């Protein structure tokens, strides 16, 4: 018997006969029936806020379901994030890796010690320690770092 293996958004596994799910509307009905009484995602499924992922990890659009999907495939369901939903931990971690990648992060590794020791050298060559200048310098540095940080968030 020809089957489609299906894993829903909460990890349950199903086997659907190919003749019952080869059309998109039939597959959508099976999914809605399977998740009808699931409190966590039931409403989102009823509204169609989910994606189906093929064995190669790509999203399968409803418009190409009939021509693309083949018997024997494993299809995984993934819920779309809601607009007010926080980022999942894995996504947040990947964003941090992007912002703290070597070229971006190395800039701060070298810039801050350079500025610090340049200021110390300036004070040493100047002879006396000007506490007011140190206060202005540290305030300007904090403002600059906050500006860079907030630019990365947006």
Image (cartoon, grey):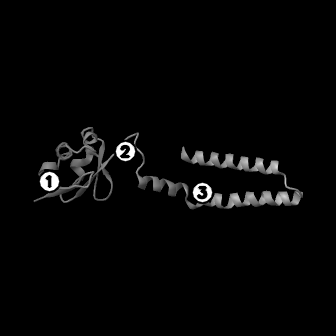
**For the residues bearing labels 2 and 1, Cβ distance under 8 angstroms:** no
Report, in whole angstroms, how far the alpha carbon at label 2 lies from the one at label 3: 28 Å
Question: Which is closer to the viewer, label 1 or label 3?
Answer: 3
List the residue tagged with mark 2: 81
Farthest top residue in view: 47
Report, in whole angstroms, how far the alpha carbon at label 2 lies from the one at label 1: 29 Å
List the residue tagged with mark 1: 18
Judging depth in this view, the residue of 137 and 19 nearest the camera is 137
Quarter of the picture holding the C terminus: top right
Q: Name the residue at 64% across, 57% down.
A: 108
Instruction: Identify the disc placed on residue 104.
Output: 3
Q: Dot 3, how many residues are within 10 Å of its Cα: few (below 14), some (14-19), or many (20+)?
A: few
Q: Dot 1, how many residues are within 10 Å of its Cα: few (below 14), some (14-19), or many (20+)?
A: some
Quarter of the picture holding the N terminus: bottom left
Return the x and y of residue 97 as percentages of the image width and height. Answer: 51, 58
Return the x and y of residue 4 as percentages of the image width and height. Answer: 18, 56
Numbered circles on residues, count: 3
Farthest left residue in view: 1
* Left or right: 86 as drawn, with respect to 25: right
As drawn, 102 above or below 10: below
């Amino acid at each position: 018997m020809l089957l489609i293996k299906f894993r829903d958004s909460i990890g349950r596994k199903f086997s659907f006969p190919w003749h019952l799910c080869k059309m998109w509307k039939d597959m959508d009905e099976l999914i809605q029936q399977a998740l009808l009484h699931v409190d966590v995602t039931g409403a989102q499924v009823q509204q169609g806020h989910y994606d189906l992922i093929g064995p190669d990890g790509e999203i399968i659009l409803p418009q190409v379901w009939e021509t693309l999907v083949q018997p024997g495939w494993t299809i995984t369901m993934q819920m779309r994030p809601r607009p007010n939903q926080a980022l999942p931990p894995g996504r947040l971690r990947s964003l941090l890796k992007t912002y703290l990648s070597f070229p971006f992060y190395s800039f701060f590794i070298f810039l801050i010690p350079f500025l610090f020791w340049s200021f110390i050298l300036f004070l040493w060559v100047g002879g006396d320690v000007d506490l007011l200048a140190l206060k202005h310098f540290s305030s300007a540095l904090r403002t600059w770092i906050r500006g860079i940080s907030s630019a990365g968030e947006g």
